[in-house]
Every structure is written in C-alpha cells, then in structure tokens.
Image (spheres, rainbow, N blue to C red):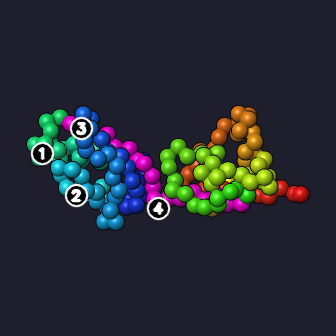
Amino acid sequence: MASWPWPRATFTLEIIGEKDLPTEYEVAPDGTVALPFINRVEVDGLEPQQISEKVRQALIAGQFFTNPVVVVSIKAFKSKQVTVAGEVKEPNSFAYKPGMTLSTAIAQAGGMTTLARSWQVVLVRKTRDGSKKAIVDYDAINNNEIADVPLQAGDKITVPQRAF
C-alpha cells in the first residue's frame, strides 16, 4: 500500500476512553505532528495503522497509559485535489477526501446549472499510461441506474454546456 502524501494532510486520532483530548491533527511541513503527552511525532510516509502503533508505543513508554487503544483515520489530503469545472454553480478545486464520488464532488461545487449537459459529464484521470477520459451519465447515477463513480486525487470533472 502506498504512503500517505505527507505533509499536508489532516487526520483524526482518538485514544479510546479519553474524551477531553483533541481528535483532529494536521501534519506539519516537516512531516511531524504535535500530539498530547508525547509532543512531536514523525509520521512522514506512515500508514494510519503505523501511526496508531507508534503513538500507542510512545504513550506506553512515557507511562501515560498501560494499554491504550489508538485509532487513526485520514480526514483530508490538502495537497490532493479534485477539480470541478464547467456548468456547475461554484467551479473550484476541492480537497480530496476518501470515499468522494462524482456526485459528491458536483454537489460540493453547488450542483449543476440549468445549462448543464448532465448526461455527458467528462471525467479525466491521470494514470501511469497518461490521462484517461471517460464520459459519465450523471442522470443515470441520480436515477440509480448506474453506480456513482469513486474519485481519486487529481481527478478533473467537467460538466459541459448543452446545446440551446
């Protein structure tokens, strides 16, 4: 599994049973994160479960907890974007979030305008072999005729204008 694109990500970290501690953290440009009790921890290149175990061991070593359960999950990649352009109300680039789909990205852009050609939404994705373009029927997604399209960081969505 590939590493997180540290720095420039936010994640949640919860020590089960500790309700008064912060749960949201941002990775600093140097690849570290400041945490309660144990100060700065290097997280550059680590997967969530590796961060969880590293924090757990530091809490035990510092004698703050005897057997803590630490849960880490990604919240957003700030350096990873999804772009929505064309006939949407608020074209923009948005932070990629795991589980993001074509319909959630379009909703985040304020939805489509009345001039949108919703049955021919263009999705461009970078791959190892170059960019790939797909035409997606957004109406079919909304009508539950086809599954929503999971997005990847770097995807570009363009909603074209329909003919008058």
Q: Which residue is mark 3?
A: 18
Between the C-alphas of marks 3 and 2, the distance is 19 Å
The image's mark for residue 61 is 1
Residue 137 percent across, percent down from the top left: 75, 45
User: Total label count?
Assistant: 4
In magenta, the rendered stretch is 68-86
Ranked by sequence position, the earlier of labels 1 and 4 is 1
- Closer to us: mark 3 or mark 4? 3
The image's mark for residue 40 is 2
Between the C-alphas of marks 2 and 4, the distance is 21 Å
Residue 43 shown left or right of residue 110 in the figure: left
Above or below 79: residue 56: above
Between the C-alphas of marks 1 and 4, the distance is 33 Å
The image's mark for residue 79 is 4
Does residue 18 show up magenta in the picture? Answer: no
At mark 4, the secondary structure is: strand
Residue at figure coordinates x 34%, y 66% from the top left: 29
Residue 10 percent across, percent down from the top left: 39, 53
Q: Nearer the viewer, residue 3 or 23?
A: 23
Q: Is residue 142 visible?
A: yes
Does residue 72 show up magenta in the picture? Answer: yes
Local packing at callout 1 (Cα closer than 10 Å; few below 14, some 14-19, many 20+) is few
Amino acid at the residue labelled 1: Ala
Label pair 3/2, CB-CB below 8 angstroms: no
Residue 95 percent across, percent down from the top left: 51, 56
- Closer to us: mark 3 or mark 1? 3
Ranked by sequence position, the earlier of labels 3 and 2 is 3
Amino acid at the residue labelled 3: Glu
